[in-house]
Image (cartoon, rainbow, N blue to C red):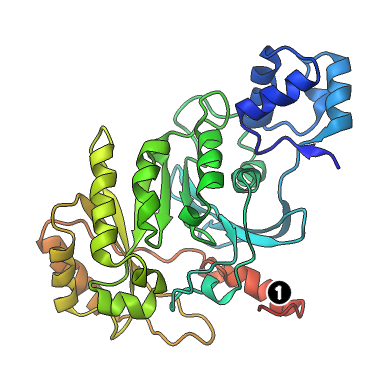
Amino acid sequence: MKKNLIGLDRDELLTEMSEMGESPFRVKQLWQWLYNKGETDFDKMTNLGKPLRQKLAENYMISRPRVVVEKNSSDKTRKWLVSFSDGEQVECVYIPEEDRGAVCVSTQIGCAQKCAFCHTGTQRFKRNLTAGEIVGQFMVARDSYGEWPTPTDEVRYLSNVVVMGMGEPLYNYDNLIKALKILMDPEGIALSRRKITVSTAGMADNIPRLATDAGTKLAISLHAPNNEIRNKIMPINRKYPLEVLLEACREYQALLPHRQYITMEYVMLKGVNDSLEQARELINLVKGLEVKFNLIPFNPWAGCPFECSDMRQIKKFAEVLEGAYYAAPIRVSRGQDIMAACGQLKSSFSENRNVPQS
């Protein structure tokens, strides 16, 4: 079977070229064709000699994830269900702003975290994604919007990446870091580390490593002001309780050479974590950290045991946090008409095809 070049880093490409008897200079040329220009046809790589192009075509492929479903929302959100070579599927979504936007990518097939409020948690964990499968999701989005070659100015509609899709990124750490380095390489896709956010449910051991290995922005799926509530809705908290998680966040901030806010994601669950007293608990919890909150109205799914907090209560909750000088915007739900919440499109597609979710 031909080897896919997407997902190979520079050292791996150098090994492949050396084994073919090619000059190391070919790595730079090939890298730019793959990741800067987004080319998928070896014959169009015109600065490579014809014999080399033939050898590449005989031994390698340039493969993206296959788009199974593409849905466009009335608010211009765009979502893809993509399939990999083994038939497994994940979701990625583009969330636009006025002149830019973020591509949300997945890192695992399913998720083992089993957070009680998360739809992806109902889908059995099957495997980690490779670096090529993670990078490939962003490349699918670029294909869809025709944003090749990599823009050289600041006008990029696909300007950010948020690693907040299906799965726990820090449990797929090596592939995650490899993918991030490919995304950030200045001669390829060329995303700034300041334009990438990695979200974790709280795998504390790898949070400081992320600061040194990638230096991206960090988001914590917090969702509770104390261990009692978090233990009930997020099983990971039993292994990494809040005091351990927040200490890892302090270490992360200390390792970065510049001031870096951590985003505390907080889904609003009616009668569970939305009281004003719990908002005050949050303020005490994060003292000593540079953080901002992102309050997320819960998006219910079939069979879930939770309801979304009333908007009036969410606004009062935000006011308490803002009164302590923390930014606490309320996330505007996007793409509701295309099932943009993580896991919804995959489940819907599988159910329509009578594929059981185990």
In percent of width and height, residue 185 lies at: 52, 29
Front in this rendered view, residue 148 or 229? 229
- In which quadrant of the rendered view does residue 268 lie? bottom left
Q: Nearer the viewer, residue 70 or 282?
A: 282
Left or right of 348 on screen, residue 98: left
Q: Judge whether residue 165 can be spotted in this image.
A: yes
How many callouts does the rendering have? 1
Residue closer to the observer: 135 or 113:
113
The residue lying at 40 percent from left, 63 percent from top is 201
Answer left or right for 350 relative to 106. right
Q: Quadrant of the N terminus?
A: top right
Residue at 80% across, 24% down: 44
Q: Amino acid at mark 1?
A: Ser
Q: Position of residue 64 (x, y in %)?
A: 72, 45
* Residue, disc 1: 350
SS for callout 1: helix
Residue 101: image location, x then y, percent: 47, 47
Establish if 28 lies above or below 71.
Answer: above
In which quadrant will I find the C terminus? bottom right
Q: Is residue 293 visible?
A: no
Percent position (x, y) of residue 83?
Answer: 72, 57
Q: Residue at x 38, y 64 (%)?
A: 332
Q: Quadrant of residue 87?
A: bottom right
| Left or right relative to 116: residue 204 | left
Say few, some or many: other residues with alpha carbon within 10 Å of mark 1 (under 14 / 14 to 19 / 20 or more). few
Above or below, comparing residue 196 to residue 338 in the picture: above
